[in-house]
Image (cartoon, grey):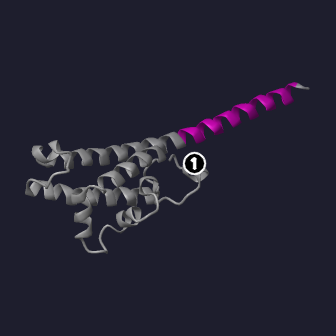
Amino acid sequence: MDTYASWSIVFQAVTATAIILAAWQVTYHARQMHRDLEMEYVKQYWDIVKSSSNKWRASHFLEEPDSEADARAIVDYLQLCEDELELRRNARVTDSTWALWAAAIASVMNMPHFRQALLDTPDEMYVELRTMLTSQQPKTYDPLKRSLIWRRLHGL
């Protein structure tokens, strides 16, 4: 093998490595952007919880809502869930985060006051949330209908 062929192999290996590292970097960056967005929604969740009364929080949200702030927290939570479902459907929430959020949404929506608040709204509101709750397995429901390979390539 001559020197030219040896250098050609080295350059091809370096180029292939650079391409792989660039692809990994793009995927990592996409995943980090998803995480940043997810943290904003986690913050919104805690803001909603903090806006409710201490008495209602102490009951783990099982007693009758104690104040106007508690009733507002329920409505805010319904909207937050709808937004999270739409984000997932549009590939903006990672698989690992969605697994946690789906289980949490399904659990909270089994609580009587939250379920009743949803039932009291017009059918055209919270469409994604209603679809999730009427699915066979709400705790594992996923509105994102993409393959695992597609999701991995998009940092999910």
Q: Please give the name of the residue rendered at 75% of the width and 35% of the height, measured from the top-left corner.
A: 12
The residue identified by callout 1 is 153
Q: Is residue 103 left or right of residue 62?
A: right
Magenta extent:
3-26
Residue at the image point whose x is 22% and y is 64% from the top: 117
Task: Residue 120 in the image: state x and y as whole percent.
Answer: 22, 70
Place of residue 67 in the rendered image (x, y in percent of width and height, measured from the top left): 8, 55
The answer to whether residue 90 of the structure is visible from this angle is: no
Prevailing SS of the magenta stretch: helix
Q: Position of residue 25 (x, y in %)?
A: 54, 38
Give amino acid for label 1.
Leu
Please check the rendered image and state whether residue 92 is part of the magenta-colored stretch, yes or no: no
Residue 6 within the segment the image draws in magenta: yes
**Nearer the observer, 84 or 24:** 84
Question: Which of the 4 image quadrants contains residue 55?
Answer: top left
Q: Position of residue 17 (x, y in %)?
A: 67, 33
Residue 91 higher or lower than 121, as above or below = above
Q: Residue at x 33, y 51 (%)?
A: 107
